[in-house]
Image (spheres, rainbow, N blue to C red):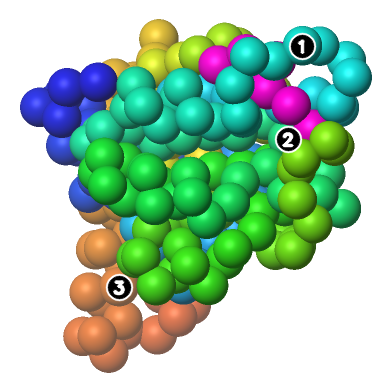
């Protein structure tokens, strides 16, 4: 994906809360609940390169999971692994993290557990997952496909959809709605910045967060 994508530049200035608020206002799902950073404080935005994992024995896979997605990705991309919420087995590991870092991939999102968390942390790679676990994927899960439509924590994600992740979690934005979501999120962020400015000026919280706050998304 090209890093000069103007939507990515705008998304990179927003946090997950503003984007989630915008999705709420538009009646769109997007927040991937239960997934958080396991490698420290990061702020990531990019476009999804998806991987779908299934139980071993379900399908024959010609390669190790995630490898094709890493090889095809780079700056501006976030590898998104649909691991069906499994926390008893890893859906990502250290060698993949090294490859992702080498290729300049923005970050990794796994709907399930990952391993080699210390390695990814030392690399400075942003990895978002449900948990860390030492258990290998070998003989337990395999890749059914990559760059396919997936579901992550109940959210439908298509290749090329937008991803933003920070300390509050992970949010996906359908590519078809990115312009509208960005417009709304930027308005939300601007209003909240103005509210914080009033706090620093000494205004009371009742004044700052009055009745208008509850109607913020409708304005």
In-image side of 23 versus 142 (left or right)? left
Magenta extent: 141-146
In-image side of 143 versus 49 (left or right)? right
* View extreme (bottom): residue: 202
Q: Is residue 172 magenta?
A: no
Q: Residues within 10 Å of mark 1 (few under 14, many from 20)?
A: few
Disc 3 is placed on an element classified as: helix
Residue 157 visible? The answer is no
Foreground residue among 204 and 125: 125
* Vertical arrangement, residue 181 with respect to residue 99, above or below: above
Q: What is the CA distance from the residue labelled 1 to the residue labelled 2? A: 17 Å
Q: Give the residue at mark 1.
A: 60
Instruction: Point out the tag, 1 or 2, that comes first from the N-terminus.
Output: 1
Q: Give the residue at mark 3.
A: 196
Give the label, 1 or 2, closer to the camera.
Answer: 1
Foreground residue among 128 and 171: 128
Q: Which mark is residue 83?
A: 2
Instruction: Point out the tag, 3 or 2, that comes first from the N-terminus.
Output: 2
* Vertical arrangement, residue 79 with respect to residue 2, above or below: below
């Amino acid at each position: 994906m090209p890093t000069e994508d103007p939507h990515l530049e705008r998304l990179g200035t927003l946090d997950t809360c503003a984007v989630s608020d915008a999705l709420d206002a538009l009646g769109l799902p997007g927040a991937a609940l239960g997934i958080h950073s396991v490698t420290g404080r990061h702020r990531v935005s990019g476009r999804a390169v998806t991987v779908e994992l299934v139980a071993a024995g379900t399908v024959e896979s010609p390669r190790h999971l995630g490898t094709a997605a890493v090889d095809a990705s780079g700056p501006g991309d976030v590898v998104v692994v649909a691991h069906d919420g499994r926390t008893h087995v890893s859906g990502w590991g250290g060698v993949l993290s090294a490859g992702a870092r080498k290729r300049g991939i923005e970050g990794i999102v796994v709907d399930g557990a990952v391993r080699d968390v210390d390695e990814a942390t030392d690399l400075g790679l942003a990895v978002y997952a449900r948990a860390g676990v030492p258990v290998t994927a070998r003989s337990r899960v395999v890749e059914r496909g990559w760059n396919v439509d997936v579901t992550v924590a109940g959210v439908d994600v298509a290749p090329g959809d937008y991803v933003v992740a920070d300390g509050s979690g992970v949010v996906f934005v359908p590519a078809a709605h990115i312009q509208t979501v960005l417009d709304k999120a930027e308005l939300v962020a601007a209003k909240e910045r103005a509210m914080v400015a009033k706090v620093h000026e000494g205004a009371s919280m009742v004044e700052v967060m009055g009745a208008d706050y509850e109607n913020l998304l409708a304005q």
